[in-house]
Image: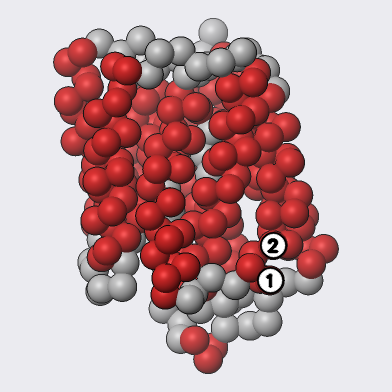
Amino acid sequence: MLVIEHINLLTTLFFFVAILYSTVGFGGGSSYIALLILMGVSHNLAPSMALICNIIVVIGGTLHFLNKGTLSWKFISPFLFLSVPLAYVGGLISINKDVYQFILAIALFLAASRMLFLKNASFQEKEHNKGPSKLLAMSIGGGLGFVSGLVGIGGGIFLAPIMYLCKWGSPKIIAATSSVFILINSIAGLVGQVQKTNGIENLTPYLQLFVSVFLGGQIGSWLCNNRISYRKIEVLTSLLILFVSIRLFSNVLII
């Protein structure tokens, strides 16, 4: 359980994380998880809280992309075909604290590495390749969906770099696809997490966290069409996630 003096700090941090991630179609789940774990939130509650924050943030981004006509359901649906049921299954799985922390540490390490070493591509609309086959898209979506539900992240932070490396769409299409992927998988994963724990504990003490990510997400969604230099913030965030992943590894591996 969070002590009250941490709430105000987390509220501020969540606000800026939401702004940063929503500018590129992400929800910020990996950073919310990192911050919650740092503050001592239990591994049973942290995934649900991170998924709720994801949903709040990416709803705004998804609506923004819908209004702009950027979304292509034909393109996105193969990624979602297996990811949704597997995100739900991942959320249902009960694992002990050490196993959860080990899996989360790996996921956070990969997410931090992606943010630290792989900059968002700057290729133009005309340069992108044809999208993946339906079978490949379903396989990638299914694997990412399962991990998303299991540890409490949306999965977009892993899907986007795969799409960038393969040039499966323009940057705007990738951001839109990631946003919808995060939203739908976060909902499926949250349903599994809540069902696993037979409900969710009272979230009243954390309401200001949800308000802060809503406001940050709205600002980020509004800014997403402008040229924003957020690379330094992204690097700092990735270093935080990297620190938490190393700390989690040490908690599990040191006897």
Q: For the residues marked 1 and 2, what is the alpha-carbon distance in whole angstroms? A: 6 Å
Q: Amino acid at mark 1?
A: Lys
Circle 1 sits in a helix, a strand or a loop, which is it?
helix
Circle 2: element type = helix
Residue 74 is tagged as 1
The percent position of residue 83, horizontal first and vertical second, equals 70, 48
Task: Work out whether residue 211 or residue 126 is closer to the camera in this orientation and state it.
Answer: 211
Out of 49 and 137, give the one closest to the viewer: 49
- Where is the C terminus found, in terms of image quarters? top right
Whether residue 150 is visible, yes or no, is no
Question: What residue is drawn where x is 24% and y is 46%?
Answer: 215
Q: Which residue ends up furthest to the right in the rendered image?
A: 135
* Residue 159 sits in quarter: bottom right
- Between 1 and 105, the one nearer to me in the picture: 1
At x 42%, y 70%, the residue is: 67
Residue behind mark 2: 77
Q: Is residue 4 left or right of residue 127?
A: left
The answer to which image quadrant residue 137 occupies is bottom right
Q: How many marks?
A: 2
Up-down relation of residue 202 to residue 168 (above or below): above
Say if 171 sits above or below 142 in the image.
Answer: below
Q: Position of residue 42 (x, y in %)?
A: 45, 14
Report the residue at 46% width, 43% height from top: 55
Q: Quadrant of residue 140?
A: bottom right
Q: Is residue 113 left or right of residue 11?
A: right
Using the image as rendered, state which of residue 88 and residue 104 is in the foreground. Answer: 88
Percent of width and height locating residue 150: 63, 31
Residue 52: x and y in percent read 45, 34
